[in-house]
Amino acid sequence: MGLVLTAGCSASSDAPDPAPEPATTDACAEVRAGIGAFNDGDLETTVERFRQAVPLAVAQAEKDDSKEAADLVEAVKYYADLDPSAYPEAARSSADFAKYKAITLGQCVPIEQPDAEPPPVTT
């Protein structure tokens, strides 16, 4: 979703600012860092990055009352609350892990590759 302005049109000062693209938000930057740490096998950092993403995702959802924003908050909280030692088993067998993986990867596609498939999360 991009903002397109055309000649002769101006945004009303009373209109709310459009929500930023999810992939460009601070919450998604932390999510991507958490995914990267997970892929590197650094589970402590994975949890820390998702914990840092929680207030960012909550703030984002306060400005964007969409289901997608609420889903991202739920997913980020799940990963932030998961014990690092539980990540490998959860990645292999948890339906919740798979659900939230789809949400985080779907919403936080790397900004340098907006048309690319989300990177796989490996264990």
Image (spheres, grey):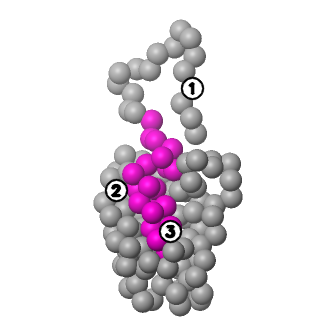
Amino acid carrying mark 2 in the image:
Leu
Q: Position of residue 67 (x, y in %)?
A: 50, 57
- Residue at left offset 40%, top offset 33%: 17
Q: Tell me which label, 2 or 1, sits earlier in the chain.
A: 1
Residue matched to label 3 = 35
Residue 34 on the magenta span: yes
Q: Position of residue 110 (x, y in %)?
A: 56, 54
Q: Position of residue 92 (x, y in %)?
A: 60, 87
- Residue at left offset 68%, top offset 58%: 117
The part of the chain drawn in magenta is 18-38
- Residue at left offset 40%, top offset 84%: 84
SS under mark 1: loop
Q: Quadrant of residue 121?
A: bottom right
Q: Tell me which label, 2 or 3, sits earlier in the chain.
A: 3
SS under mark 2: helix
Q: Gap in Å between the C-alphas at discs 2 and 1?
A: 26 Å
Which label number is shown at residue 69? none
Residue 13 on the magenta span: no
